[in-house]
C-alpha cells in the first residue's frame, strides 16, 4: 500500500452526486462532504469491551450534498432508495418505511441534545460502500451527517456540549476538526446508533471514519480513547471479498454477543474484558457459562493479537502479522461464533493462495466480507482466483475490491 495514495474520490462521482441533488431539489448543493468506510484489521468486537483495535479507512465512501432551507423541514434523498424521507426538524421520529434514514435522524437528535442548533436542509446521499458487506456504511453515513450539519450550521462540539462556533476563512472554509472534536463527534454518532437505531456497538467504526490517515493503520485504545497511526508496509494490497451474505446487526446477534461479554466480565469481577489476562480467564473459567467463556476467550485473545500485531508492524514482520489475521478468524469461527460458512470458505481459499499473507472476517460478522492482505504483485492473480473458486464452490458471484487506505471524513 502506497502511503501517498490519494483520498480524493473520482471526479465523476462528485459530478454525479451534484447532478442527483440538482434533479431532486431543482437547485445546486452548497456543501459536499465525504466519509470513508472502514476495515477492521485486528480486534474483533474488542471496542465495546474497552479493548484494542487496528483498523483502516478505505476509499469506499458515503457522500452527502446539501443546502439549507428556511421552512424548518428536512428532506433526504438517497441514490440507493427510491423514496425520499421528509420531516420537520423539531419532529424527528422513526419511519418504518425508511429505516436507512434512522442513521441520519439519530445523529441530528444527538447533536440537538448536545446544544447544537440547526434548521432545515435538503440532502442527497450517494454511497460507494457495498451495503451489508461489513465496511460500516452506517458509521460513514452518521459521520457524513454530522459534518454536513457542521457545514450548514457551524458548531463546535465538546465533551460538555456545544461551544463557540468556528469561523469561516476568506474562502468560506471551516477550520479542520481537532482530535478532541473528532472524538466528541464519534461519541455522538455512536450514541445515535446505539440509542436510536438499536445496535449496541462500540466506537471502532466512528473513530475509523474520522481519524483515518492515508497509508496508515489506525491504532485505537478504547479504554483510554487514544488514537495513533502506524504506516502499513509497502508492497501490500488490501482486498475485500464480499461473501454476498448480508449481515443485519439490528437483528440481534451483535447485541447478544455483547451481553455475553458483559456477563463474563461481571462473573470475573471486572468492569470489562479488557482487564482480563489469559491466565485469569482460565482461572475463572468455572464461574462462566460455556457461551460466556467462549466469547471471553475470543476477546481476551483478540487484545493479545492486537498487541503482538502492532509489534510485528513496527518490526516490519508482515508475514507474522498476516498469521495473526488467520488466527483471529479461527477464533471468530470456533469461539465467538460470528462467522458463517461463506466467510470460512473465503478465508480457506485465501490461505491457499501463495500471495496472501493473512485473511479474516472484518466487522461484526454473521455475513459480510473478509479482509485480505496480499502481496501487491500477486493482487491480480488473487482476485481472479478467488472469484473463480468462490463461484465454483458456492454459485455466488464474487467481485473482490482492491482498497486504498485513505484519510478520514471531511
Image: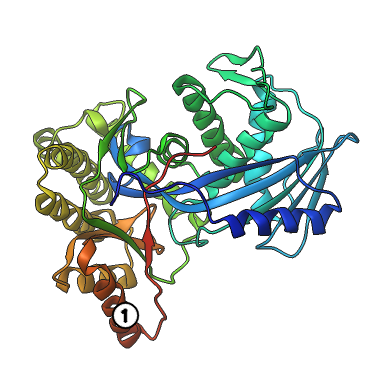
| Residue 195 coordinates in the image, percent (x, y) | 58, 37
Q: Where does residue 66 sit, x and y in percent of width and height?
A: 73, 43
The coloring applied to the image is rainbow
Horizontal side of 385 relative to 401 (left or right) equals left
Instruction: Identify the image quadrant of the C terminus.
Output: top right
Residue in the foreground of this view, choosing between 407 and 226: 407
37 left or right, relative to 317? right
In the rendered image, which quarter is residue 98 located in? bottom right
Instruction: Name the outermost residue toward the front.
Output: 170
Q: Is residue 37 above or below residue 392?
A: above
Measured from the top left, where is residue 139 in percent x and y? 52, 44
Identify the residue at image location x=35%, y=84%.
Answer: 391
Q: Residue at x 54, y 56 (%)?
A: 10
Residue 69 versus residue 396 in the image, above or below: above
Left or right of residue 96, residue 217 in this image: left
97, 39: nearer the viewer: 39
> How many marks overall?
1
Disc 1 target residue: 390
Horizontal and vertical percent position of residue 171: 67, 27
Q: Residues within 10 Å of mark 1 (few under 14, many from 20)?
A: many
Q: Residue at x 67, y 52 (%)?
A: 125
Q: Is residue 140 visible?
A: yes
The residue that appears at 37% across and 42% down in the rendered structure is: 214
* Image position of 53 (left or right of 37): left
Question: In this view, which residue lies farthest toward the right?
Answer: 71
At mark 1, the secondary structure is helix
Above or below for 146 versus 333? above
Residue 96 can be seen, yes or no: no
Amino acid at each position: 500500500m502506497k502511503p501517498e495514495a490519494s483520498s480524493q474520490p473520482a471526479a465523476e462521482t462528485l459530478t454525479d452526486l451534484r447532478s442527483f441533488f440538482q434533479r431532486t431539489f431543482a437547485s445546486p448543493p452548497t456543501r459536499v462532504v465525504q466519509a470513508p468506510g472502514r476495515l477492521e484489521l485486528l480486534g474483533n468486537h474488542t471496542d465495546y469491551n474497552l479493548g484494542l483495535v487496528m483498523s483502516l479507512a478505505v476509499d469506499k465512501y458515503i457522500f452527502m450534498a446539501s443546502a439549507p432551507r428556511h421552512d424548518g423541514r428536512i428532506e433526504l434523498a438517497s441514490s440507493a432508495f427510491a423514496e425520499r424521507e421528509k420531516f420537520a426538524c423539531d419532529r424527528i421520529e422513526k419511519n418504518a418505511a425508511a429505516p436507512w434514514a434512522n442513521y441520519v435522524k439519530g445523529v441530528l437528535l444527538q447533536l440537538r441534545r448536545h446544544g447544537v442548533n440547526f434548521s432545515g436542509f435538503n440532502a442527497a446521499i450517494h454511497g460507494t460502500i457495498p451495503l451489508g458487506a461489513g465496511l460500516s456504511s452506517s458509521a460513514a453515513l452518521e459521520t457524513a451527517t454530522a459534518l454536513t450539519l457542521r457545514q450548514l450550521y457551524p458548531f463546535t462540539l465538546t465533551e460538555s456540549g456545544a461551544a463557540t462556533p468556528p469561523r469561516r476563512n476568506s474562502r468560506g472554509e471551516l477550520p479542520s476538526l481537532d482530535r478532541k472534536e473528532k472524538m466528541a463527534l464519534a461519541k455522538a454518532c455512536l450514541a445515535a446508533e446505539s440509542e436510536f437505531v438499536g445496535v449496541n456497538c462500540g466506537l471502532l467504526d466512528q473513530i475509523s471514519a474520522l481519524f483515518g490517515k492515508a497509508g496508515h493503520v489506525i491504532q485505537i485504545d478504547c479504554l483510554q480513547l487514544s488514537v495513533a497511526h502506524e504506516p502499513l508496509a509497502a508492497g501490500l494490497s488490501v482486498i475485500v471479498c464480499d461473501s454476498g451474505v448480508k449481515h443485519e446487526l439490528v437483528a440481534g446477534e451483535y447485541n447478544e454477543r455483547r451481553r455475553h461479554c458483559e456477563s463474563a466480565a461481571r462473573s470475573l469481577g471486572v468492569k470489562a474484558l479488557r482487564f482480563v489476562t489469559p491466565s485469569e480467564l482460565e482461572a475463572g473459567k468455572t464461574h462462566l457459562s460455556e457461551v460466556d467463556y467462549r466469547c471471553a476467550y475470543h476477546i481476551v485473545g483478540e487484545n493479545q493479537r492486537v498487541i503482538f500485531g502492532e509489534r510485528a508492524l513496527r518490526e516490519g514482520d508482515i508475514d507474522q502479522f498476516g498469521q495473526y489475521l488467520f488466527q483471529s478468524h479461527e477464533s471468530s469461527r470456533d469461539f465467538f461464533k460470528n462467522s458463517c460458512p461463506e466467510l470460512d470458505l473465503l478465508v480457506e481459499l485465501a490461505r491457499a493462495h501463495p500471495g496472501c499473507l493473512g485473511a479474516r472476517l472484518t466487522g461484526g460478522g454473521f455475513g459480510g466480507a473478509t479482509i485480505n492482505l496480499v502481496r501487491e504483485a500477486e493482487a491480480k492473480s488473487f482476485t481472479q482466483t478467488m472469484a473463480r473458486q468462490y463461484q465454483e464452490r458456492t454459485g455466488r458471484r464474487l467481485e473482490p475490491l482492491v482498497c486504498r487506505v485513505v484519510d478520514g471524513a471531511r
